[in-house]
Image: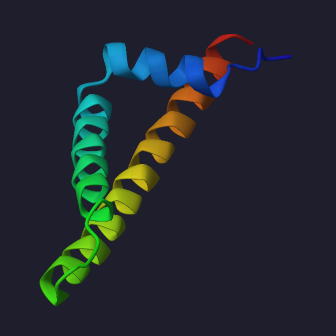
Amino acid sequence: MGVMIGETEVRQQLMASNEEYRRLAAEHQSYAEQLEQLTHRTHLTEDEKLREITLKKKKLMLKDQMYSIVQKHRRQLEASSC
């Protein structure tokens, strides 16, 4: 029976060993910071509202890609521990 590996541990391993995962995480963080700046504004222009929506979609897309990499890595780790 395989050993279950925690989500945090898998993410840490990927940050240390997977260039694509690091790139996606950095881009995700950049979008999060840009969104944070927008949320501190009291009033958003139409362009800023559109930018906020776009950033949220891009951030979610990156999160999905990162999750896919995590799942693939986890399956590989669990298969190799059998």
Q: Is residue 32 above or below residue 13?
A: below
Q: In this figure, what is the number of numbered marks?
A: 0
**What quarter of the picture does the N terminus occupy?**
top right
Q: Is residue 42 left or right of residue 80?
A: left
Q: Residue at x 45, y 15 (%)?
A: 13
76 vs 34, nearest the viewer: 34
Q: How is the image coloured?
A: rainbow
Residue at 29% from the left image edge and 41% from the top image edge:
29
Q: Is residue 20 above or below residue 36?
A: above
Residue 55 placement, left or right of 81? left
* Residue closest to the far right: 1
x, y percentage for residue 70?
A: 51, 35
Residue 7 on image: x %, y %: 62, 28
* Residue shown at 74% from the left, 12% from the top: 82
Find residue 18 and report its horizontal and vertical position in percent: 31, 23
In front of the other: 57 or 80? 57
Q: Quadrant of residue 53?
A: bottom left
Residue at the extreme front: 42
| Of 65 and 27, the residue lying toward us | 27
Residue 11 place in picture, x, y as percent: 48, 25
Q: Residue furthest bottom?
A: 46
Q: Which image quadrant is residue 61 in?
A: bottom left
